[in-house]
Every structure is written in structure tokens, then in C-alpha cells.
Image: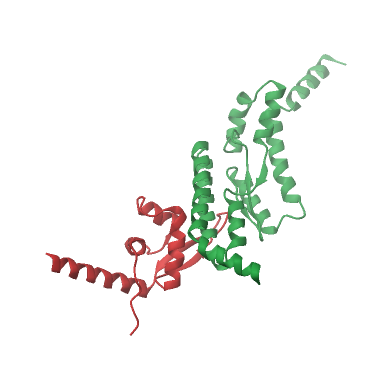
């Protein structure tokens, strides 16, 4: 049986933010702004790259019409990421239920 | 020469005399044209410069294998209309100050903030790491930096630049075990 991917605190936060966004697709900078200081500019992309390797998120390059400069990279949660997050939420509620 | 002729010529000289702000505007447009006419500029850069010229504000360009940013001096006005209205009054009369202002306001192609660090990271890390981590990071720095410049918030722009460089260093440090190992393996190969 395959193991569920382990989720760190930052990874959970990123998935939560991505699932909470309206179009379910965010840039790294938007994630940093939405996290209110919990995610740092320098490490957010390192975490996102690790999550991509685990298959929790996918990304694509976006070049907006009329915008000069480097293309931006938008991130989206995969089905595996969504399931891992749901499993973690269930485990947490069960654990908190046992404590109460 | 009749009186009519002399008035005509005086008026003509007065009207055709180039004011400092007109000269500056002409220089500004000429520098963009010079860059646009250069042979080694890739088509993507030319396209972005054309876009930049039409906007008259902050300019960025990404070419094949090179990233460039067209930047005007910090005291330069936002748009040509602004220049027409205000530049004349702001232009200093002293030749030294005038020269300094021209130097400060000249248009030049510069690298975007953090580009040297990005190149270092590109050299040290794998192509995929550069694509997934450093390129989007550089893009974010560019966007924030240009937003600050467009709002004429120079201090914020400087802060964004510093913070961006710091974030690139942080990312490099976070990935250091990977690229150090890679460098050792490369040296031994």
C-alpha cells in the first residue's frame, strides 16, 4: 500500500491557501501576501518545488498579454494534494476529538 | 531687410529655439530609437521596447538568454505629457546641474534587480531548479520593483531590490546541500 505523502506545516498552509483562492491558482508572491508573514519570499518557491516533486501541486508558466518581463509561474493543487490535505484534516479532527 | 521680415525672423528663431525640456525629450526618444536600431538586440527586446515607448513609464524586456530592463533616471517624469507640463520648470539653469540631470535621466538598458545572483544560481543549480525556483522569484522581484518605480516610490523600490536579493540568497542557502554536492561531483568528473 502506498503511503500518503507527509505534509509539513508550510505545505499544509500552501494547500489551504490554494484551495481557498477563488480560481484555485496563485503565484508565489500572492501566496506570500496571503499567508501574512507565515511564508517567506526566499523559501516559498523551494517549498513549492518540493511539493511539485511530491505531486501535491502543479505549476504552469503564464505570460500575460501586454506584460513585459519574465513569465510568472502559477501553482495549483493536484488531486493527490487535495486528498492528502483532507486526510490530514480528518486525522487532526479525530485526534482533537480524542483529546476532548 | 524690412521690418516685417525682421519680425518674421525673430519670431521664427524664438519659436524654433529648442528649450531644454524639448532637448531632453528628444534625447530620451533618440536613446530608445538607438537601442531599437542596434543589430544585436533580439526581436523580443525590440517588441518590448516598442511597448515601453508607447507606455512611457517603467520598462522591462526579456530576450533570448538575456534579461534586460530599460530604466529611466529617478528624477524623470512618468510620461511625456507630464514632461511637457512640468519639465521646463524643473530643469536647472546651471550647466553642471543640467549635465548631472541629463546623466541621471538618460535612458539605459540595465539588468533587473537580482539578475547577477540569478545567473550565479543558474550556474550552480540544475536547469529545472532554476526554472522552478529562481526564475519565478526573479519575476516576482521585477514585478514588485517596477510597481514601486511606476508609483515613483524610490525608497520602496530600493527596499524591494534589497529584499529580493536577500530572498535569492535565502533560496540559494536553502538549496546549498544540493548545489554543493553537484559542484563537487562536477569537479570530480
Tell me the residue at 32%/72% (across/down).
A84
Q: Residue furthest bottom?
A: A1
| Residue nearest the viewer, comparing B142 with B122 | B122
Task: Tell me, by letter, which chain the rendering colours red.
Answer: A
Query: At which x and y percent is residue A74?
Result: 46, 63
Q: Nearer the viewer, residue B59 or B96?
A: B96
Q: Quadrant of the N terminus of chain B?
A: top right
Task: State the green chain.
Answer: B
- Residue A37 shows in this picture: yes
The image quadrant where one finds the C terminus of chain B is bottom right
State left or right for residue B106 relative to residue A93.
Answer: right
The answer to whether one can see residue A64 in this image is: no
Q: Position of residue A26 (x, y in %)?
A: 41, 60
Please state the horizontal and vertical placement of residue B121, each as a whole percent of the image.
58, 58
Coordinates of residue B99 in the picture (x, y in percent): 71, 28
Vertical position of residue B119 compared to residue B127: above or below: above
Q: Residue at x 50, y 36 (%)?
A: B155
Instruction: Give me the residue at 46% from left, 66% from top.
Output: A49
Q: Residue furthest right?
A: B1
Instruction: Write down the quadrant of residue A1 in the picture.
Output: bottom left
Image vertical order of residue B150 relative to residue A46, above or below: above
Examine the rendered structure and indicate whether residue B169 appears above or below residue A92.
above
Amino acid at each position: 500500500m502506498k503511503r500518503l505523502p507527509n505534509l509539513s506545516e508550510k505545505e499544509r498552509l500552501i494547500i489551504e491557501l490554494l484551495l481557498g483562492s477563488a480560481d484555485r491558482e496563485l503565484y508565489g508572491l500572492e501566496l506570500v501576501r496571503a499567508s501574512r508573514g507565515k511564508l517567506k519570499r526566499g523559501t516559498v518557491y523551494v517549498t513549492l518545488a518540493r511539493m511539485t516533486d511530491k505531486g501535491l501541486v502543479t505549476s504552469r508558466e503564464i505570460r500575460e498579454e501586454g506584460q513585459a518581463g519574465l513569465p510568472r509561474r502559477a501553482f495549483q493543487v493536484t488531486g493527490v494534494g487535495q486528498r492528502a490535505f483532507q486526510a490530514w484534516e480528518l486525522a487532526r479532527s479525530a485526534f482533537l476529538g480524542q483529546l476532548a | 531687410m524690412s521690418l516685417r521680415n525682421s519680425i518674421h525672423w525673430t519670431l521664427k528663431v524664438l519659436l524654433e529655439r529648442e528649450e531644454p525640456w524639448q532637448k531632453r525629450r528628444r534625447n530620451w526618444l533618440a536613446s530608445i530609437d538607438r537601442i531599437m536600431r542596434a543589430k544585436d538586440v533580439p526581436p523580443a527586446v525590440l517588441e518590448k521596447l516598442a511597448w515601453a515607448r508607447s507606455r512611457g513609464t517603467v520598462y522591462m524586456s526579456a530576450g533570448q538568454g538575456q534579461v534586460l530592463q530599460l530604466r529611466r533616471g529617478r528624477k524623470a517624469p512618468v510620461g511625456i505629457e507630464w514632461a511637457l507640463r512640468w519639465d521646463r520648470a524643473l530643469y536647472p539653469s546651471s550647466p553642471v546641474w543640467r549635465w548631472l540631470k541629463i546623466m541621471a535621466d538618460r535612458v539605459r538598458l540595465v539588468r533587473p534587480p537580482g539578475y547577477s545572483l540569478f545567473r550565479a544560481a543558474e550556474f550552480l543549480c540544475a536547469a529545472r531548479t532554476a526554472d522552478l525556483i529562481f526564475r519565478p522569484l526573479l519575476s516576482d522581484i521585477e514585478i514588485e520593483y517596477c510597481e514601486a518605480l511606476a508609483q515613483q516610490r524610490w525608497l520602496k523600490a530600493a527596499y524591494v531590490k534589497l529584499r529580493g536579493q536577500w530572498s535569492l540568497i535565502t533560496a540559494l542557502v536553502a538549496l546549498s546541500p544540493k548545489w554543493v554536492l553537484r559542484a563537487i561531483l562536477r569537479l570530480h568528473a
